Image: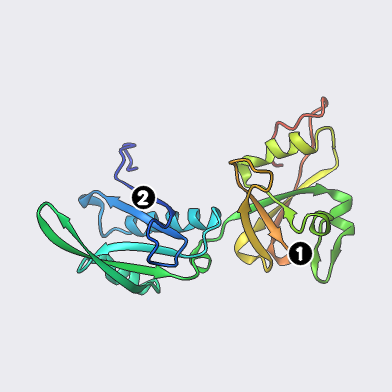
Amino acid sequence: MNGNDEIIGFTNGGPNRSESYACDGEVMAIYLLEGYQRQGVGKRLLQASIDRLVQDGFQSMLVWVIEGNPACRFYDSMGGRVVGDKVESIAGRAIKELAYAWDDIEQLATARRIYHITGRAQWLNLQSTGGYEHPTLQTEGFIHCSDRQQILGVANRYFKGQNDLIVLELDASKLKSKLVYENTSGGSEKFPHVYGPINLDAVLMIHFFPCDVDGIFRNGLI
């Protein structure tokens, strides 16, 4: 949106629609009003798509672009490679489109923050030279985390009445262990899971996280 809250562009991504290419994700559309082009807005839209694809667990990405479009130079600069082409008929004209692919989009993602709820004693007692290892790493194979908007729901679902909690704020881009967004219970909401120890240099901040007197968490992070 611009300063008048008017929509000036949009982007859309999801699973790759073409079986001809091995990429699991695809940016299907990037549209920007002409008056806002060549101002860096398109780059931010693409970055938002990349970050969301990574958050949703996609590892690679395909983008279709009309041959000769100035965006081709941008995709080249971002490390994309042309892996194919096709000809589409648009308004009676034959238009050639190029398929750009990236095999590893996680390295293109911007730093993003995820959060892990734990007890103060656990945090102090489960650290080692290899990092922090929550017991679920042994019992379930990963450490449970949340996005910021998921924290209160998770706390009230699993930690109600516990008044000794802290929340670790993590820089996901610094994690040395694999990060996957998924729902292992079969629901539609995806949560970040860390498949290995949390290296201590990925911890940006530690938040105290008290509940109210009735045991409910309402106040977010402190």
Q: Quadrant of the C terminus?
A: top right
In the drawing, what numbered circle is on residue 11? 2
Residue at the image point whose x is 38% and y is 49% from the top:
12
Residue 97 position, x and y percent, is 24, 65
Residue at the image point whose x is 62% and y is 51% from the top:
182
Disc nearer the start of the sequence (1/2): 2
Residue 207 position, x and y percent, is 74, 47
Residue 77 position, x and y percent, is 35, 74
The amino acid pointed to by label 1 is Pro
Q: CA distance from mark 1 to mark 2?
A: 35 Å
The furthest residue to the top:
214
The amino acid pointed to by label 2 is Thr
Residue at the image point whose x is 76% and y is 59% from the top:
141
Can residue 93 be seen by looking at this rendering?
Answer: yes
Report helix, strand or loop for mark 2: strand
Question: Is residue 181 found left or right of 86 in the rendered image?
Answer: right
Question: Is residue 157 found left or right of 172 in the rendered image?
Answer: right
